[in-house]
Image (cartoon, grey):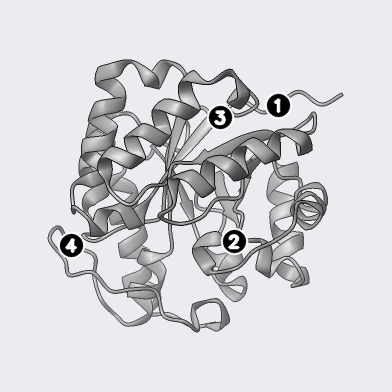
Amino acid sequence: MQVALICPPALLKRYGSLTKYHLVLPHLFQERRYRDFYLSRSKEGDYLILDNGAAEGLRFGVTHLYTVAEKMGVHEIVVPDVIGDMDATISKALAFTRYTREGFRYMLVAQGKDIPEMIQCIDYFCTDTKFMYATTIGIPRHINKVDPFARLKISEYIQKTGLDSVMEYHYLGASDPFDEVLYLAAVGLGRGIDTSAPIYMGRWGMVLEEGHGYRARPKDFFKISRVNTETTEKNILTYLEWALYDRDAGLPEKAPTS
């Protein structure tokens, strides 16, 4: 499975190129070193996904998202969603059909207050022709607050029903426990996952281990410039091993440009 390592701007040169799959955050677009780094990765052939800001508690208009996407060489855009609200998310996904453009792929985010609602949302995205503009569904980490094995159960449902032949899947964020990715990778459904955990845990000198306690990302994460290098590198290696990451594995197909 691909891994997108989310780094503070100051640490991008050290850790940002360790994988070729990236999740770009729109609220950091104004920082030149962040913008330039990911544009250079795009030119090198890496795959860039643009998040919509919802997980950061932010909202960005379509115009801003496309400005970021175009100036950073993004390949896939996460369609706006509402955390925990299936109906509002579906409404936003329907409204977005008016704003799609050639040259980009699109990721719909499955939402719901529980596992059945999230599954219902995925079913709808996969079977209604109105959503044919999208090629990927993101499964967010917050559903694991309902059940620590929620994403695993949802992934098994997707495979059992054959919905993995309709859409690709990405896990949005690392969850509690961090070694959840071990089980997700073993299922073999997900195209990729994004996480900042190996880096901020390394900042505190905390080693990622199976069964390790969960720590939420600190609010000042994007401002940090130093970490415990030895621990952080060990954490990254551990996480990549858990995810069965293969640097030589093929990246997602990019949308054709006109």
Instruction: Give the residue type that dot 3 points to.
Output: Pro
Q: Which mark is residue 209?
A: 4
Earlier along the polypeptide chain: callout 4 or callout 1? 4
92 on left or right of 109? right
Q: Position of residue 24 (x, y in %)?
A: 62, 56
Q: Secondary structure at mark 2?
A: loop
Q: Which mark is residue 255?
A: 1
Q: Alpha carbon of mark 1 to alpha carbon of mark 2: how far?
A: 22 Å
Q: Alpha carbon of mark 1 to alpha carbon of mark 3: how far?
A: 9 Å
Task: Find disc 3 in the rendering and name its residue.
Answer: 252
Regarding residue 135, the answer to whether it shows in the image is yes
Closer to the camera, 80 or 105?
A: 80
10 Å neighbourhood of mark 3: few (<14), some, or many (≥20)?
Answer: some
Q: At x 53% / y 40%, what residue is drawn?
A: 90
- The quadrant in which the C terminus is found is top right
Instruction: Give the residue type that dot 2 points to.
Output: Gly
Q: Which mark is residue 53?
A: 2
10 Å neighbourhood of mark 4: few (<14), some, or many (≥20)?
Answer: few
Earlier along the polypeptide chain: callout 3 or callout 4? 4
Q: Which is more foreground, mark 3 or mark 4?
A: 3
Q: Secondary structure at mark 1?
A: loop
Q: Alpha carbon of mark 3 to alpha carbon of mark 2: how far?
A: 22 Å
Q: Alpha carbon of mark 4 to alpha carbon of mark 2: how far?
A: 29 Å
Q: Position of residue 62 (x, y in %)?
A: 76, 51
| Farthest-out residue, right | 258
Closer to the camera, 228 or 111?
A: 111
| Farthest-out residue, left | 211
Q: At x 61% / y 76%, what residue is drawn?
A: 10
Earlier along the polypeptide chain: callout 3 or callout 2? 2
Instruction: Give the residue type that dot 1 points to.
Output: Ala
